[in-house]
Image (cartoon, rainbow, N blue to C red):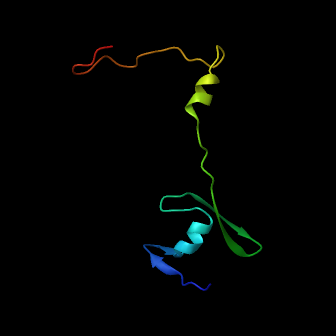
């Protein structure tokens, strides 16, 4: 597919067709990695790490448990 580079502020922009974005699972706000490989511009989607709260809580132990602390006094009607 051919596309045209357009001006976007002081930069250049390239529109990514929805069909291409769908094939690599990117959407508005997705992060991508830009690189130059063999004289070509390569755009690769970055995979977002998915977190599982249950797994994270199960990983808490005495070595990585942080103590509670307050960094400021209550404001307004807060009760600590």
Location of the N terminus (image quadrant): bottom right
* Residue in the foreground of this view, choosing between 6 and 48: 48
Residue 16 appears in view = no
* Residue in the foreground of this view, choosing between 77 and 70: 77
Q: In which quarter of the image is residue 60?
A: top right
Instruction: Identify the residue at image location x=58%, y=38%.
Output: 51
Residue furthest left in the image: 76
Q: How many labels does the image show?
A: 0
Residue 23 appears in view = yes
Residue furthest right in the image: 38
Q: Quadrant of residue 57?
A: top right
* Residue in the foreground of this view, choosing between 79 and 20: 20
Which x, y percent locates residue 30?
A: 53, 58
Which x, y percent locates residue 49?
A: 61, 45
Instruction: Identify the residue at image location x=62%, y=56%.
Output: 46
Q: In this view, does 48 lie to the left or right of 77?
A: right
Instruction: Identify the residue at image location x=51%, y=76%.
Output: 15
Which x, y percent locates residue 26?
A: 56, 62
Which x, y percent locates residue 31?
A: 56, 57
Instruction: Identify the residue at image location x=33%, y=13%.
Output: 80
Q: Quadrant of residue 43?
A: bottom right
Against 54, residue 51 (above or below) is below
* Residue in the foreground of this view, choosing between 51 and 35: 51
């Amino acid at each position: 597919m051919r596309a045209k580079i357009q001006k976007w502020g002081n930069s250049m922009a390239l529109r990514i067709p929805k069909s291409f974005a769908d094939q690599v699972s990117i959407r508005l706000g997705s992060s991508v990695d830009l690189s130059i490989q063999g004289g070509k511009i390569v755009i690769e989607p970055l995979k977002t790490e998915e977190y599982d709260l249950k797994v994270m809580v199960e990983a808490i132990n005495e070595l990585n448990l942080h103590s509670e602390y307050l960094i400021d006094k209550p404001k307004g009607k807060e009760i600590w």
